[in-house]
Amino acid sequence: MTTTTPTASPAPATPDGLDIRRIGGRIGAEVHGLDLAGDIAPETVRAVGAALLEHKALVFRGQHLDDAGQLRFASHFGELTTAHPTVPSVDGQPNILPVDGDEGIRANHWHTDVTFVRTPPKASTLRALVVPPYGGNTLIANTAAAYRDLPEPLRELADRLWAVHTNAHDYAEPRSEKAAEHRRQFVSRRYRTAHPVVRVHPESGERALFIGGFAQSLVGFGPSESRDLLRLLQSYVTRPENVVRIAWNPGDLVLFDNRITQHYAPDDYGDLPRLLHRVTVAGDVPAGVDGGRSRAVEGDDAAHYTPSAA
C-alpha cells in the first residue's frame, strides 16, 4: 500500500498586504502584514485558515495583544474551550490558561494539547508575555510528515492501532510544593481516552500520528510492548526535519493546528521567568483510518471544557 497526501481544496487568494513566509522545510510560516488587534476581514480569516492547514503552525510577530485581543483572534477559528479540564484559568478569564515557566511545572515533554479527553482542541494560540533572554523556545512537530516517513509495514500497523491517553500517568517526583500542587490540580479529575494512533484530519484528509506524552498504552498490548511501539512511532515525530523551533519575543503569538502537531518547551532557561497565555479552539472527536471514533475509557466527556461533542 502506498500513501499519498490528499489534495486539499484550492487555497483562497491571499488578500493584499498579507505576506506568508515559510520558516521550515516541513512545518511553520510567519505571517506579516496583519494587525491582529484590528478588525480582520472574513477573506483574511479564510486565508489564514488555509495557511494553517498548509503550514500547521503560524507565527505572528510583535502583535502585543491583550487578553481580549487574543480571545477575539482565536474565536475567528471556532468556539473556544475553557482554559483546561482541571487546571485553573487566569483570574477572571475562564478561557485563558497561564503557561507559567516556574521550575518543576514546565511542559518539557512532547505532547498534543489535552488529548486525554474525547474532544481535544482543534487549534491552540500561545501569546508571549514574559520571555527569558535566552532559551525558552517552543518546538512544534508536523505529525503528518512523521506518518509519511514511516516504512510501509509500520504505517500499515499504525493504521490499526489505538492508544489510551491519560492525564494520570506516572510523573517524575515534583521538585517543589508549587509543582506538587500543580500536579494535584492536573489529576484532580482522571481521564482515560482511547484515540486512533493514526488520525485522519477532518479538513485536509491527511493522516497523522496522534500520540505524544499523554499516550501511555496501546489497546491489546502489554506495558512493555506499548512503550516500545510508542517510542518507535514517536521517534519519527521528533526527527529534526519535522520540527520547527520558535524563538519568542514579547508580544508574539503562535497559532498551531492541534490535530496534526505536537509541541515541546525545552527546560533550558534556569530560574528565569517565562509566561505565555494559551487560548484553545474546540475540536471534534478524532476519527481513524477505518472511520472509528475516539471513546472515553474513564472520566466524563469534559463538557465543562469543550462545547464540541460532534
Image (cartoon, rainbow, N blue to C red):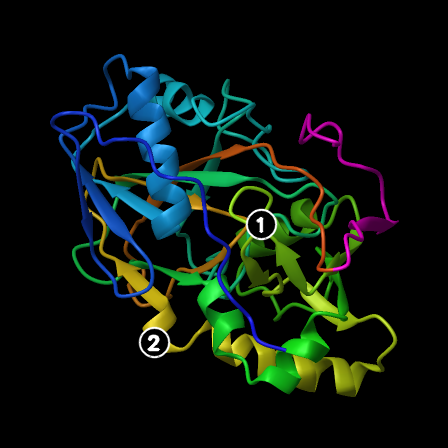
- Is residue 193 shown in magenta? no
Residue drawn 78% across the image and 72% down it: 218
Left or right for 57, reference 78: left
> Percent position (x, y) of residue 124?
46, 40
CA gap, disc 1 and disc 2? 23 Å
Q: Nearer the viewer, residue 125 or 55?
A: 55
Q: Residues within 10 Å of mark 2 (few under 14, many from 20)?
A: few
Mark 1: few/some/many CA within 10 Å (<14, 14-19, 20+): some
Residue 291 lies, in percent from the top left, at: 77, 52
Specify the label residue 201 is tagged with. Answer: 1
In the figure, 175 relative to 239: above or below? Answer: above
Q: Quadrant of residue 79?
A: top right
> If the image is split into quadrants, where does the N terminus sit?
bottom right
Q: Quadrant of the C terminus?
A: top right
Q: Which residues, given as a range, are shown in magenta?
A: 290-310
Name the chief secondary structure element in magenta: loop
Disc 2 marks which residue? Answer: 240
